C-alpha cells in the first residue's frame, strides 16, 4: 500500500504541474499533492514500528 501512495503522489505531481501551467498556480494543488505523500510517510512509520514490535 505504501507504493500505491508513493506512485499516486508522483503521478499527481506531473498532472497538477501540467494543470498549473495551463490554468495558473493554485495552493490547493499543493494540498492535493501533500495528501498521498503524507499517507505514504504515515504508513511507512507505522510499518517500521510494527516491525520493531514483532522482533
Image: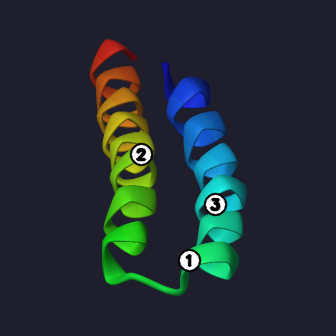
Label 1 or label 3, whichever comes before in sequence order = 3
Neighbourhood count class around disc 3 (C-alpha, 10 Å): few under 14, some 14–19, many 20 upward: some
Q: Which residue is mark 3?
A: 13
The residue drawn where x is 69% and y is 80% is 21
Is label 1 in contact with label 3 (beta carbons under 8 Å)?
no
Report the mark closest to the observer, 2 or 3.
3
Give the residue drawn at x 41%, y 49%: 41
Q: CA distance from mark 2 to mark 3?
A: 11 Å
Identify which residue is drawn at 40% across, 22% down.
Answer: 51
Q: Quadrant of the C terminus?
A: top left
Q: CA distance from mark 1 to mark 3?
A: 15 Å
Mark 3 lies on a secondary structure that is helix
Q: State the image quarter where residue 52 is shown.
A: top left
| Front-most of residues 19 and 2 | 19
Colour treatment of the image: rainbow
The percent coordinates of residue 10 (x first, y second) are: 67, 50
Residue furthest top as drawn: 54
Q: Which residue is mark 1?
A: 23
Q: Nearer the viewer, residue 24 or 51?
A: 24
Residue 50 in the image: above or below residue 19: above
**Label 1 CA crowd tier, 10 Å (few <14, some 14–19, many 20+):** few
Residue 36 is tagged as 2
Q: Earlier in the sequence, mark 2 or mark 1?
A: 1
Farthest residue, direction front: 23
CA distance separating discs 2 and 1:
22 Å
Q: Is residue 22 left or right of residue 33?
A: right
Mark closer to the chain start, 2 or 3: 3
Q: Residues within 10 Å of mark 2 (few under 14, many from 20)?
A: many
Amino acid at each position: 500500500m505504501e507504493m500505491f501512495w508513493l506512485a499516486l503522489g508522483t503521478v499527481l505531481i506531473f498532472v497538477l504541474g501540467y494543470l498549473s501551467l495551463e490554468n495558473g498556480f493554485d495552493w490547493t494543488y499543493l494540498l492535493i499533492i501533500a495528501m498521498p505523500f503524507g499517507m505514504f510517510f504515515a504508513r511507512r512509520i507505522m510499518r517500521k514500528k510494527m516491525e520493531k514490535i514483532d522482533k
